[in-house]
Amino acid sequence: MATIREVVEALSRRSGVDAVVVVGRDGLPIDSRTADGVDAENVAALLPSVINGVTQLGQAGGRGEFGTGVLEFGSGLAVVSVLNAEALLVVLVRPSTNVGALLYDLRRHRSAIAGLL
């Protein structure tokens, strides 16, 4: 059986990925793999409030619970996902990266990844 560290490493080896951070709801990193220039601890600290905000947006808009989303920035994308009630995931990718396969894999394997925590 794979470990969470092996999953993080595998995700980080995907083309265009700059960082993978698994975060507790308390904002502390559980595991991470980042390229130069990415501050995993700061990303981890900020992620819970981002997830809380989009969760509230989904509830206000009648969309239900938040699962996964893609945030676009000037220098790339952030794919954010709720793994379970205790853990979150963020994958930072470069702007030209096709995230379709990543989104599919996260949706398909979310419960298996969460089970590793």
Image: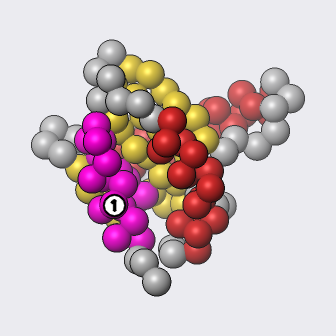
Residue 100 is situated, as x and y percent measured from the top left of the image, at 51, 35
Q: Position of residue 20 (x, y in %)?
A: 35, 51
Q: Quadrant of residue 32?
A: bottom left
Is 46 rendered above or below residue 31? Answer: above
* Residue found 81% across the figure and 27% down from its top: 60
Is-magenta flag for residue 59? no
Looking at the picture, tell me which residue is in the foreground, 58 or 91.
91
Is residue 106 visible in the rendered image? The answer is yes
Viewer-closest of 48 and 100: 100
Which region of the structure is painted magenta? 4-22
* The furthest residue to the left: 36
Residue at image location 16% in from the left, 38% down from the top: 37
Residue located at (28% from left, 37% from top): 16
Q: Nearer the viewer, residue 47 or 69?
A: 69
Residue type (three-letter) at the residue carrying disc 1: Ala
Is residue 10 located in the magenta-colored stretch of the structure? yes
**Position of residue 4 measured from the top left corner of the image (x, y, whole percent):** 41, 71
